[in-house]
Protein backbone atom coordinates (compact mmCIF):
# COMPACT_ATOMS: atom_id res chain seq x y z
CA UNK A 1 0.00 0.00 0.00
CA UNK A 2 1.93 3.01 -1.33
CA UNK A 3 0.20 6.39 -1.61
CA UNK A 4 1.66 8.60 -4.33
CA UNK A 5 0.51 11.94 -5.73
CA UNK A 6 2.04 13.93 -8.56
CA UNK A 7 1.17 16.78 -10.87
CA UNK A 8 1.61 20.44 -11.72
CA UNK A 9 -0.23 23.56 -10.57
CA UNK A 10 -0.29 27.34 -10.91
CA UNK A 11 2.65 27.64 -8.52
CA UNK A 12 4.97 25.30 -10.44
CA UNK A 13 3.94 25.72 -14.07
CA UNK A 14 2.73 28.50 -16.39
CA UNK A 15 -0.58 28.20 -18.21
CA UNK A 16 1.20 27.17 -21.42
CA UNK A 17 2.42 24.01 -19.67
CA UNK A 18 -0.71 23.32 -17.60
CA UNK A 19 -2.94 23.24 -20.65
CA UNK A 20 -0.78 20.54 -22.22
CA UNK A 21 -1.52 18.04 -19.44
CA UNK A 22 -5.14 18.97 -18.72
CA UNK A 23 -7.71 16.16 -18.87
CA UNK A 24 -11.00 16.59 -20.70
CA UNK A 25 -13.90 15.73 -18.38
CA UNK A 26 -15.54 13.50 -20.99
CA UNK A 27 -12.37 11.44 -21.36
CA UNK A 28 -11.47 11.21 -17.68
CA UNK A 29 -12.78 7.67 -17.13
CA UNK A 30 -10.94 6.42 -20.19
CA UNK A 31 -7.74 8.03 -18.86
CA UNK A 32 -8.19 6.35 -15.48
CA UNK A 33 -8.70 2.96 -17.12
CA UNK A 34 -5.61 3.54 -19.25
CA UNK A 35 -3.51 4.41 -16.20
CA UNK A 36 -4.59 1.40 -14.15
CA UNK A 37 -4.34 -1.13 -16.99
CA UNK A 38 -1.13 -0.01 -18.70
CA UNK A 39 0.92 0.60 -15.54
CA UNK A 40 1.47 -0.89 -12.09
CA UNK A 41 -0.95 1.64 -10.56
CA UNK A 42 -3.58 -0.18 -8.48
CA UNK A 43 -5.89 2.76 -7.69
CA UNK A 44 -6.16 6.21 -9.23
CA UNK A 45 -8.08 9.50 -9.19
CA UNK A 46 -7.33 12.52 -11.37
CA UNK A 47 -8.02 16.14 -10.40
CA UNK A 48 -7.88 18.46 -13.43
CA UNK A 49 -8.85 22.12 -13.09
CA UNK A 50 -7.74 25.44 -14.59
CA UNK A 51 -5.05 25.71 -11.91
CA UNK A 52 -3.84 22.13 -11.55
CA UNK A 53 -3.59 18.62 -12.90
CA UNK A 54 -2.93 16.05 -10.16
CA UNK A 55 -2.97 12.27 -10.00
CA UNK A 56 -3.52 10.46 -6.70
CA UNK A 57 -2.72 6.77 -6.81
CA UNK A 58 -1.72 3.59 -5.02
CA UNK A 59 1.49 2.29 -6.54
CA UNK A 60 4.95 1.12 -5.59
CA UNK A 61 6.26 2.13 -9.03
CA UNK A 62 6.05 5.90 -9.11
CA UNK A 63 8.29 6.31 -12.15
CA UNK A 64 5.92 4.39 -14.40
CA UNK A 65 3.06 6.64 -13.27
CA UNK A 66 5.09 9.75 -14.09
CA UNK A 67 6.00 8.32 -17.49
CA UNK A 68 2.32 7.61 -18.14
CA UNK A 69 1.29 11.25 -17.72
CA UNK A 70 3.72 12.35 -20.42
CA UNK A 71 2.96 9.49 -22.80
CA UNK A 72 -0.82 9.89 -22.42
CA UNK A 73 -0.57 13.52 -23.53
CA UNK A 74 2.00 12.62 -26.19
CA UNK A 75 4.74 14.86 -24.86
CA UNK A 76 8.23 14.10 -23.61
CA UNK A 77 8.57 13.69 -19.88
CA UNK A 78 11.63 15.96 -19.94
CA UNK A 79 9.34 18.70 -21.26
CA UNK A 80 7.24 18.77 -18.08
CA UNK A 81 9.77 17.38 -15.58
CA UNK A 82 10.88 20.83 -14.30
CA UNK A 83 7.30 21.64 -13.34
CA UNK A 84 6.26 18.31 -11.77
CA UNK A 85 6.01 17.59 -8.07
CA UNK A 86 6.05 14.00 -6.82
CA UNK A 87 4.76 13.35 -3.31
CA UNK A 88 4.98 9.97 -1.54
CA UNK A 89 2.92 8.78 1.44
CA UNK A 90 2.66 11.48 4.14
CA UNK A 91 3.53 14.27 1.70
CA UNK A 92 0.75 13.13 -0.64
CA UNK A 93 -1.80 13.11 2.19
CA UNK A 94 -0.67 16.53 3.41
CA UNK A 95 -0.99 17.93 -0.11
CA UNK A 96 -4.51 16.53 -0.58
CA UNK A 97 -5.60 18.02 2.76
CA UNK A 98 -4.13 21.44 1.86
CA UNK A 99 -5.71 21.47 -1.59
CA UNK A 100 -9.18 20.60 -0.30
CA UNK A 101 -8.86 23.20 2.46
CA UNK A 102 -8.06 25.97 -0.03
CA UNK A 103 -4.50 26.50 1.22
CA UNK A 104 -2.92 25.60 -2.12
CA UNK A 105 -5.26 27.67 -4.29
CA UNK A 106 -4.60 30.87 -6.21
CA UNK A 107 -7.46 32.28 -4.16
CA UNK A 108 -6.56 31.43 -0.57
CA UNK A 109 -9.47 29.71 1.15
CA UNK A 110 -11.64 29.38 -1.97
CA UNK A 111 -14.26 26.64 -1.83
CA UNK A 112 -14.67 25.69 -5.49
CA UNK A 113 -11.71 23.30 -5.37
CA UNK A 114 -13.49 21.15 -2.79
CA UNK A 115 -16.37 20.54 -5.19
CA UNK A 116 -13.93 19.80 -7.99
CA UNK A 117 -12.14 17.26 -5.82
CA UNK A 118 -15.43 15.59 -4.89
CA UNK A 119 -16.27 15.33 -8.60
CA UNK A 120 -12.86 13.77 -9.29
CA UNK A 121 -13.59 11.12 -6.66
CA UNK A 122 -17.06 10.42 -8.11
CA UNK A 123 -15.54 9.98 -11.56
CA UNK A 124 -12.90 7.57 -10.22
CA UNK A 125 -15.57 5.62 -8.34
CA UNK A 126 -17.65 5.33 -11.51
CA UNK A 127 -14.57 4.22 -13.42
CA UNK A 128 -13.88 1.56 -10.77
CA UNK A 129 -10.36 2.83 -10.01
CA UNK A 130 -10.92 3.65 -6.34
CA UNK A 131 -9.80 1.17 -3.70
CA UNK A 132 -9.47 1.07 0.07
CA UNK A 133 -6.47 3.42 0.20
CA UNK A 134 -7.91 6.23 -1.92
CA UNK A 135 -11.35 5.87 -0.38
CA UNK A 136 -9.80 6.39 3.03
CA UNK A 137 -7.58 9.24 1.78
CA UNK A 138 -10.44 11.26 0.35
CA UNK A 139 -12.75 10.46 3.25
CA UNK A 140 -10.13 11.98 5.53
CA UNK A 141 -9.46 14.81 3.05
CA UNK A 142 -13.06 16.01 3.02
CA UNK A 143 -13.27 15.67 6.80
CA UNK A 144 -10.13 17.79 7.25
CA UNK A 145 -11.40 20.43 4.81
CA UNK A 146 -14.64 20.71 6.78
CA UNK A 147 -12.73 21.02 10.06
CA UNK A 148 -10.43 23.71 8.66
CA UNK A 149 -13.31 25.74 7.26
CA UNK A 150 -15.40 25.52 10.44
CA UNK A 151 -12.53 26.02 12.90
CA UNK A 152 -10.77 28.89 11.12
CA UNK A 153 -11.70 31.93 9.05
CA UNK A 154 -9.42 30.95 6.18
CA UNK A 155 -12.12 31.81 3.64
CA UNK A 156 -12.99 35.19 5.12
CA UNK A 157 -12.78 38.13 2.67
CA UNK A 158 -11.94 35.72 -0.13
CA UNK A 159 -11.97 37.30 -3.60
CA UNK A 160 -13.14 34.74 -6.15
CA UNK A 161 -11.92 34.50 -9.74
CA UNK A 162 -15.38 35.65 -10.83
CA UNK A 163 -15.24 38.73 -8.59
CA UNK A 164 -11.71 39.45 -9.84
CA UNK A 165 -12.96 39.40 -13.44
CA UNK A 166 -15.57 42.05 -12.57
CA UNK A 167 -12.92 44.20 -10.87
CA UNK A 168 -10.73 44.05 -13.94
CA UNK A 169 -13.65 44.96 -16.21
CA UNK A 170 -14.31 48.00 -14.05
CA UNK A 171 -10.75 49.14 -14.68
CA UNK A 172 -11.41 49.13 -18.42
CA UNK A 173 -14.94 50.51 -18.48
CA UNK A 174 -16.33 53.28 -16.24
CA UNK A 175 -19.44 51.18 -15.61
CA UNK A 176 -20.30 47.56 -16.38
CA UNK A 177 -23.94 48.69 -16.43
CA UNK A 178 -23.24 50.41 -19.78
CA UNK A 179 -21.77 47.28 -21.39
CA UNK A 180 -23.01 44.08 -23.01
CA UNK A 181 -21.57 40.83 -21.65
CA UNK A 182 -21.03 37.56 -23.55
CA UNK A 183 -20.42 34.32 -21.69
CA UNK A 184 -19.05 31.35 -23.62
CA UNK A 185 -19.76 28.05 -21.85
CA UNK A 186 -22.38 27.14 -19.27
CA UNK A 187 -20.42 25.36 -16.55
CA UNK A 188 -19.89 26.20 -12.90
CA UNK A 189 -17.25 28.88 -13.48
CA UNK A 190 -19.35 30.69 -16.08
CA UNK A 191 -22.35 30.50 -13.76
CA UNK A 192 -20.29 32.14 -10.98
CA UNK A 193 -19.05 34.85 -13.34
CA UNK A 194 -22.55 35.50 -14.68
CA UNK A 195 -23.82 35.93 -11.13
CA UNK A 196 -21.15 38.54 -10.34
CA UNK A 197 -21.55 40.46 -13.60
CA UNK A 198 -25.35 40.35 -13.42
CA UNK A 199 -25.13 42.09 -10.05
CA UNK A 200 -23.72 45.12 -11.97
CA UNK A 201 -26.84 45.15 -14.22
CA UNK A 202 -25.18 45.14 -17.66
CA UNK A 203 -27.18 46.21 -20.74
CA UNK A 204 -27.53 42.63 -21.95
CA UNK A 205 -26.24 39.14 -21.22
CA UNK A 206 -25.73 36.52 -23.93
CA UNK A 207 -24.73 32.91 -23.21
CA UNK A 208 -23.13 30.84 -25.99
CA UNK A 209 -22.72 27.10 -25.52
CA UNK A 210 -22.38 23.91 -27.51
CA UNK A 211 -25.75 22.83 -26.09
CA UNK A 212 -28.17 25.72 -26.63
CA UNK A 213 -30.73 24.35 -24.15
CA UNK A 214 -28.18 24.48 -21.36
CA UNK A 215 -27.18 27.99 -22.38
CA UNK A 216 -30.82 29.05 -22.34
CA UNK A 217 -31.33 27.65 -18.83
CA UNK A 218 -28.45 29.79 -17.56
CA UNK A 219 -29.48 32.84 -19.57
CA UNK A 220 -33.02 32.71 -18.21
CA UNK A 221 -31.67 33.23 -14.69
CA UNK A 222 -30.28 36.61 -15.69
CA UNK A 223 -32.89 37.73 -18.24
CA UNK A 224 -30.43 37.07 -21.02
CA UNK A 225 -30.50 35.21 -24.32
CA UNK A 226 -28.72 32.15 -25.66
CA UNK A 227 -27.04 30.98 -28.88
CA UNK A 228 -25.00 28.03 -30.12
CA UNK A 229 -21.24 28.29 -30.58
CA UNK A 230 -21.65 28.32 -34.37
CA UNK A 231 -23.39 31.70 -34.09
CA UNK A 232 -20.51 33.41 -32.28
CA UNK A 233 -18.95 35.11 -35.36
CA UNK A 234 -22.05 37.20 -36.09
CA UNK A 235 -22.67 38.19 -32.46
CA UNK A 236 -19.14 38.80 -31.13
CA UNK A 237 -18.84 42.39 -32.34
CA UNK A 238 -21.89 43.44 -30.31
CA UNK A 239 -20.35 42.58 -26.95
CA UNK A 240 -17.90 44.64 -24.90
CA UNK A 241 -17.06 42.01 -22.29
CA UNK A 242 -16.36 38.37 -23.15
CA UNK A 243 -15.83 35.71 -20.49
CA UNK A 244 -15.13 32.18 -21.67
CA UNK A 245 -14.60 28.85 -19.93
CA UNK A 246 -15.37 25.68 -21.87
CA UNK A 247 -13.94 22.18 -21.99
CA UNK A 248 -12.90 22.52 -25.63
CA UNK A 249 -9.51 21.10 -26.54
CA UNK A 250 -9.09 23.72 -29.30
CA UNK A 251 -9.49 27.52 -29.22
CA UNK A 252 -13.02 28.81 -29.83
CA UNK A 253 -12.08 32.41 -30.57
CA UNK A 254 -9.29 32.82 -33.11
CA UNK A 255 -7.34 35.94 -33.98
CA UNK A 256 -9.16 36.34 -37.29
CA UNK A 257 -12.62 36.23 -35.73
CA UNK A 258 -11.68 38.81 -33.11
CA UNK A 259 -10.04 41.07 -35.72
CA UNK A 260 -13.25 41.12 -37.73
CA UNK A 261 -15.26 41.88 -34.60
CA UNK A 262 -12.96 44.81 -33.71
CA UNK A 263 -13.31 46.21 -37.21
CA UNK A 264 -17.10 46.04 -36.94
CA UNK A 265 -16.89 47.73 -33.53
CA UNK A 266 -14.82 50.56 -35.05
CA UNK A 267 -12.08 49.57 -32.60
CA UNK A 268 -14.06 50.22 -29.45
CA UNK A 269 -12.21 48.31 -26.67
CA UNK A 270 -13.10 44.72 -25.90
CA UNK A 271 -12.40 43.16 -22.50
CA UNK A 272 -11.85 39.37 -22.63
CA UNK A 273 -11.30 36.87 -19.82
CA UNK A 274 -10.23 33.33 -20.72
CA UNK A 275 -10.67 31.04 -17.71
CA UNK A 276 -10.33 27.80 -19.67
CA UNK A 277 -7.48 25.29 -19.57
CA UNK A 278 -6.65 24.57 -22.39
CA UNK A 279 -7.35 28.15 -23.46
CA UNK A 280 -10.46 29.09 -25.44
CA UNK A 281 -8.90 32.21 -26.98
CA UNK A 282 -5.83 32.07 -29.21
CA UNK A 283 -2.83 33.66 -27.51
CA UNK A 284 -2.24 35.91 -30.56
CA UNK A 285 -5.47 37.77 -29.73
CA UNK A 286 -3.59 39.52 -26.92
CA UNK A 287 -1.42 41.23 -29.56
CA UNK A 288 -4.40 43.06 -31.07
CA UNK A 289 -4.95 46.72 -30.30
CA UNK A 290 -8.12 47.52 -28.37
CA UNK A 291 -8.24 44.01 -26.83
CA UNK A 292 -7.62 43.54 -23.11
CA UNK A 293 -7.16 39.78 -22.72
CA UNK A 294 -6.68 38.17 -19.32
CA UNK A 295 -6.06 34.50 -18.52
CA UNK A 296 -6.41 32.56 -15.27
CA UNK A 297 -2.86 33.43 -14.28
CA UNK A 298 -3.36 37.13 -15.04
CA UNK A 299 -6.05 37.31 -12.37
CA UNK A 300 -3.54 36.34 -9.69
CA UNK A 301 -2.67 39.86 -8.56
CA UNK A 302 -6.32 40.82 -8.17
CA UNK A 303 -7.25 37.83 -6.05
CA UNK A 304 -4.35 38.54 -3.70
CA UNK A 305 -6.26 41.54 -2.37
CA UNK A 306 -7.56 40.67 1.07
CA UNK A 307 -4.85 38.01 1.45
CA UNK A 308 -3.29 39.65 4.51
CA UNK A 309 -6.52 39.40 6.47
CA UNK A 310 -6.54 35.63 5.94
CA UNK A 311 -2.86 34.86 6.50
CA UNK A 312 -3.33 34.94 10.27
CA UNK A 313 -5.55 31.89 10.00
CA UNK A 314 -3.15 29.87 7.82
CA UNK A 315 -0.98 28.67 10.70
CA UNK A 316 -4.06 27.47 12.56
CA UNK A 317 -5.24 25.58 9.48
CA UNK A 318 -1.77 24.09 8.92
CA UNK A 319 -1.70 22.82 12.51
CA UNK A 320 -5.02 21.04 12.02
CA UNK A 321 -3.77 19.49 8.79
CA UNK A 322 -0.48 18.33 10.31
CA UNK A 323 -2.30 16.54 13.10
CA UNK A 324 -4.60 14.79 10.65
CA UNK A 325 -1.65 13.80 8.45
CA UNK A 326 -0.11 12.00 11.44
CA UNK A 327 -3.40 10.16 12.00
CA UNK A 328 -3.62 9.09 8.35
CA UNK A 329 0.01 7.93 8.22
CA UNK A 330 -0.61 5.85 11.35
CA UNK A 331 -3.62 4.27 9.63
CA UNK A 332 -1.50 3.43 6.55
CA UNK A 333 1.24 1.92 8.68
CA UNK A 334 -1.32 -0.15 10.57
CA UNK A 335 -2.80 -1.43 7.31
CA UNK A 336 0.66 -2.57 6.20
CA UNK A 337 0.82 -4.82 9.29
CA UNK A 338 -2.47 -6.53 8.47
CA UNK A 339 -0.94 -9.42 6.45
CA UNK A 340 1.54 -10.15 9.25
CA UNK A 341 -1.15 -10.01 11.94
CA UNK A 342 -3.44 -12.20 9.85
CA UNK A 343 -0.63 -14.72 9.30
CA UNK A 344 0.14 -14.80 13.03
CA UNK A 345 -3.51 -15.39 13.91
CA UNK A 346 -3.86 -18.11 11.25
CA UNK A 347 -0.77 -19.80 12.63
CA UNK A 348 -2.21 -19.77 16.18
CA UNK A 349 -5.61 -20.94 14.90
CA UNK A 350 -4.05 -24.04 13.33
CA UNK A 351 -2.48 -24.92 16.69
CA UNK A 352 -5.79 -24.40 18.45
CA UNK A 353 -7.79 -26.57 16.04
CA UNK A 354 -5.24 -29.39 16.17
CA UNK A 355 -5.22 -29.49 19.97
CA UNK A 356 -9.02 -29.17 20.17
CA UNK A 357 -9.44 -32.21 17.92
CA UNK A 358 -6.99 -34.12 20.07
CA UNK A 359 -8.82 -33.12 23.27
CA UNK A 360 -12.20 -34.09 21.82
CA UNK A 361 -10.88 -37.54 20.96
CA UNK A 362 -9.56 -37.97 24.53
CA UNK A 363 -12.97 -37.00 25.93
CA UNK A 364 -14.69 -39.40 23.54
CA UNK A 365 -12.52 -42.19 24.97
CA UNK A 366 -13.81 -41.34 28.43
CA UNK A 367 -10.65 -39.79 29.80
CA UNK A 368 -10.82 -37.50 32.83
CA UNK A 369 -11.91 -33.97 31.67
CA UNK A 370 -9.54 -32.31 34.11
CA UNK A 371 -6.65 -34.28 32.65
CA UNK A 372 -7.77 -33.41 29.12
CA UNK A 373 -7.81 -29.69 29.97
CA UNK A 374 -4.35 -29.99 31.51
CA UNK A 375 -2.97 -31.71 28.41
CA UNK A 376 -4.66 -29.20 26.11
CA UNK A 377 -3.33 -26.15 27.94
CA UNK A 378 0.19 -27.56 28.23
CA UNK A 379 0.31 -28.51 24.55
CA UNK A 380 -0.87 -25.06 23.44
CA UNK A 381 1.64 -23.34 25.71
CA UNK A 382 4.50 -25.46 24.34
CA UNK A 383 3.51 -24.86 20.73
CA UNK A 384 3.07 -21.11 21.14
CA UNK A 385 6.46 -20.80 22.84
CA UNK A 386 8.39 -23.26 20.68
CA UNK A 387 9.37 -20.88 17.86
CA UNK A 388 10.45 -17.88 19.99
CA UNK A 389 12.31 -20.21 22.39
CA UNK A 390 14.03 -21.95 19.49
CA UNK A 391 15.00 -18.61 17.92
CA UNK A 392 16.42 -17.38 21.21
CA UNK A 393 18.40 -20.58 21.84
CA UNK A 394 19.97 -20.51 18.36
CA UNK A 395 20.62 -16.77 18.13
CA UNK A 396 24.16 -15.61 17.46
CA UNK A 397 25.91 -13.28 19.85
CA UNK A 398 25.19 -10.21 17.74
CA UNK A 399 21.47 -11.00 17.52
CA UNK A 400 20.85 -12.41 20.99
CA UNK A 401 20.64 -9.10 22.89
CA UNK A 402 18.30 -7.59 20.28
CA UNK A 403 16.09 -10.68 20.35
CA UNK A 404 15.95 -10.70 24.16
CA UNK A 405 14.89 -7.04 24.15
CA UNK A 406 12.26 -7.67 21.50
CA UNK A 407 10.78 -10.72 23.26
CA UNK A 408 10.74 -8.85 26.56
CA UNK A 409 8.68 -6.11 24.92
CA UNK A 410 6.34 -8.55 23.17
CA UNK A 411 5.62 -10.61 26.28
CA UNK A 412 6.00 -7.78 28.84
CA UNK A 413 8.75 -9.64 30.70
CA UNK A 414 10.34 -7.98 33.71
CA UNK A 415 13.80 -9.30 34.50
CA UNK A 416 14.96 -9.35 38.10
Image (cartoon, rainbow, N blue to C red):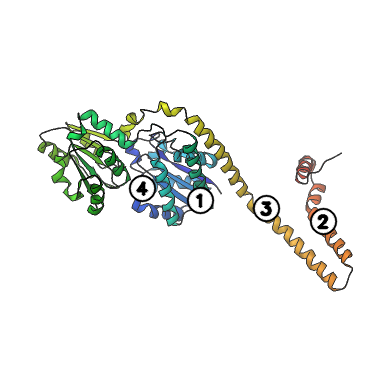
Distance between mark 1 and mark 3 Cα atoms: 23 Å
Check disc 4 and report the residue beneath it.
23
Name the residue located 59 percent from the left edge and 46 percent from the top edge.
331
Considering the numbered disc 3 on the image, is that residue within a helix, a strand or a loop? Answer: helix
- For marks 1 and 4, the one nearer the N-term is 4
Q: Position of residue 385 (x, y in %)?
A: 80, 53
What residue does disc 3 label? Answer: 341
For mark 1, give the secondary structure. helix
State the separation of the CA atoms marked 2 and 4: 60 Å
Q: Residue 176 in the image: x percent, y percent?
A: 21, 34
N-terminal of the pair, mark 2 or mark 1, is 1
User: Which residue is the site of mark 2?
Assistant: 381
How far apart are the alpha carbons under marks 2 and 1?
41 Å
Assess disc 2: are there few (<14), some (14-19) or many (≥20) residues with their C-alpha within 10 Å of its C-alpha: few
Q: Are marks 1 and 4 in contact (CB under 8 Å)?
A: no
36 is higher (above) or lower (below) than 79: below
Residue shown at 32% from the left, 29% from the top: 302
**Which is more toward the observer, 20 or 247?**
247
Mark 2 or mark 4, earlier in chain: 4
Q: Nearer the viewer, residue 37 or 158?
A: 158
Residue 343: % across, % down: 68, 56
Q: Is residue 239 left or right of residue 322?
A: left
- Where residue 135 is drawn, which disc sits there? 1
Q: Are marks 3 and 4 in contact (CB under 8 Å)?
A: no
Amino acid sequence: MQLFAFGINHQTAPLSIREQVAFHAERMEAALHDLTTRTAVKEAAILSTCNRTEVYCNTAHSETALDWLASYHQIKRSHIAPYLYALPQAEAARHAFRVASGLDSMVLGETQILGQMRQAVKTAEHAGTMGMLLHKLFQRTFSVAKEVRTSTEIGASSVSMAAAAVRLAERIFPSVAEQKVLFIGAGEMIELCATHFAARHPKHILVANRTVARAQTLADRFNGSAIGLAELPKHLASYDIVVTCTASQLPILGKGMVERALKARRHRPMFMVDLAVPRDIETEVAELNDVFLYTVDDLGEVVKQGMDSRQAHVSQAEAIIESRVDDFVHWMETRELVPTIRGLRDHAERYRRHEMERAQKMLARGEDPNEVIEVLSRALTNKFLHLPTHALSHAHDNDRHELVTLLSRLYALHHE
